[in-house]
Amino acid sequence: MPVTGWVISSIVAGVLGSISVAIVAPMNRKVVRDKWGKIDFTKTDFYFYWTRWDTIILVAAIYTFLNITGLLIFLLRGDNINSPLIQFFIHQTFVFSLITFIWLITKLIYVFKGIKARWPDEFK
């Protein structure tokens, strides 16, 4: 059973993941922190508007959809798990759907924490 699809997919996932982290990481400078190093949501507006983080989430979601579509096309064509293309699409679909889900949930948690910190009297 050839493993070329998994290897190539792992390399692609590593490169795309590194690029995403390199794009998102510098945004930490815009986050205001208190003296204990925790995010001060009352002073940080960063989570309340569209950022590069949101763009990366959207691009990752589109990429995941394209991988699912590619997987479907090759499965309908009659390929099986021994095909390097099927291996590639399965791996990419799994990795990027997981990354997209985790990034989206993390972003939503930060937004909700910010809302709760700014308007605490609304949540009693």
Image (cartoon, helix red, strand yellow):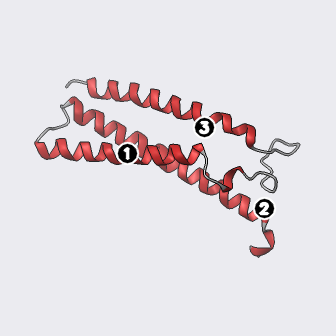
User: Residue type at mark 2?
Assistant: Ala
Element on which disc 1 rests? helix
Residue under label 2: 117
Nearer the N terminus, badge 3 or badge 1?
Answer: 3
Q: Quadrant of the N terminus?
A: top left
Which label number is shown at residue 64?
A: 1
x%, y% of residue 55?
Answer: 53, 46
The span from disc 3 to disc 2 (Cα, nearest Å) is 24 Å
Residue 28 to residue 43: above or below = above
Q: Quadrant of the C terminus?
A: bottom right
Question: Relative to the observer, which residue lies in front, 22 or 123?
Answer: 22
Quarter of the image for residue 89 reads top left
Residue 94 to residue 87: above or below = below
Residue under label 3: 24
User: Residue type at mark 3?
Assistant: Val
Element on which disc 2 rests? helix
Q: Residue at x 77, y 51 (%)?
A: 44
Quarter of the image for residue 81 reads top left
Nearer the N terminus, badge 1 or badge 2?
Answer: 1
